[in-house]
């Protein structure tokens, strides 16, 4: 049996969110170069990567069903912060995010051979001040290692979140509202489970 969609992602968070709403998917992770173009804004960047992941996922899976791609970036003062390379990098990232408001942008894209649709989710997140010792302990949990901005709202990092203006699932990596708009657009039968 064909799945409804291909998920062009290795992120366990994206799988978990699709499972929450009962979507039948198959995973086909793809590798894309995640380097922003010179002068490319964060919104354009995540939309471009989401679409690239979706298109490559569609081709690689060869399942004849639409492929979903997504990309999340944490943005402070128009700078894309990315994932931490090591503890010192996480310390610098969380030091900058501590006690400040940043933007989390997630692009989602759904594509097949002749159709493609994209949506953008933008959230503003305020983190409370985070102490150096707290960063050290947080790093030791392993949680921040593969997360943009070195924190996870859905995990222990939730204790740092003083305010969220936007989409919780968008910050987590797959905005469910926007994703279901894409499903409707390309006639993915997600409502069958409701
Ligand atoms: C800010 C934040 C990010 N993240 C995650 C979401 C994304 O998985 C990750 C950002 O990296 P992405 O490059 O968007 O995704 P990925 O590398 O995990 O997976 P793939 O490219 O295969 O789809 O950070 C959280 O889980 N919680 C948060 O609060």
Image (cartoon, rainbow, N blue to C red):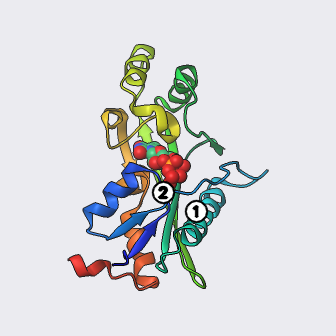
Residue 29 % position (x, y): 51, 57
Coordinates of residue 60 in the picture (x, y in percent):
57, 67
Q: Quadrant of the C terminus?
A: bottom left
Residue at x-position 44% and y-position 32%: 144
Question: In which quadrant of the rendered image does the N terminus lie?
Answer: bottom left
Residue drawn at x 33%, y 63% as measured from the top left = 18
**Is disc 2 in contact with disc 1, using a CB cutoff of under 8 Å?**
yes
Image location (x, y in percent) of residue 169: 36, 56
Q: In the picture provided, is 88 more to the left or to the right than 38? A: left
Q: Can you name the residue that lies furthest to the top here?
A: 133
Question: In the rendered view, would you say 39 is above or below 121?
Answer: above
Of residues 162 and 1, the one nearer the viewer is 1
For the residue with label 2, is its CB less than 8 Å from the closest atom of ligand 1?
A: yes
Crowd around label 2: few <14 · some 14–19 · many ≥20 (10 Å): many
User: For mark 1, what is the residue?
Assistant: 53
Residue occupying the point 31% across, 55% down: 16
Q: Position of residue 97 (x, y in %)?
A: 51, 33
**As drawn, 161 above or below 133:** below
Asked which secondary structure carries label 1, the reply is helix
Q: Nearer the viewer, residue 163 or 61?
A: 61
Q: Is mark 1 within 8 Å of ligand 1?
A: yes
Residue topped by disc 2: 9
193 sits to left or right of 186: left
Asked whether the viewer can see residue 165, the reply is no
């Amino acid at each position: 049996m064909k799945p409804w969609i291909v998920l062009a992602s290795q992120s366990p968070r994206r799988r978990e969110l699709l499972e929450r709403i009962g979507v039948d998917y198959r995973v086909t992770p793809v590798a894309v170069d995640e380097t922003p173009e010179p002068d490319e804004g964060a919104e354009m960047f995540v939309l471009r990567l989401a679409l690239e992941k979706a298109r490559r996922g569609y081709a690689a899976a060869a399942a004849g069903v639409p492929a979903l791609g997504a990309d999340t970036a944490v943005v402070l003062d128009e700078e894309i912060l990315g994932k931490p390379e090591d503890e010192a990098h996480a310390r610098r990232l969380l030091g900058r995010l501590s006690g400040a408001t940043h933007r989390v942008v997630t692009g989602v894209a759904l594509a097949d051979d002749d159709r493609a649709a994209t949506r953008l989710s933008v959230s503003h997140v305020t983190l409370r001040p985070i102490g150096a010792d707290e960063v050290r302990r947080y790093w030791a949990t392993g949680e921040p290692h593969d997360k943009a901005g070195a924190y996870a709202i859905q995990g222990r990092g939730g204790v740092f979140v003083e305010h969220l203006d936007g989409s919780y699932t968008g910050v987590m990596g797959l905005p469910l509202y926007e994703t279901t708009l894409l499903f409707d657009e390309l006639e993915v039968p997600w409502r069958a489970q409701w």
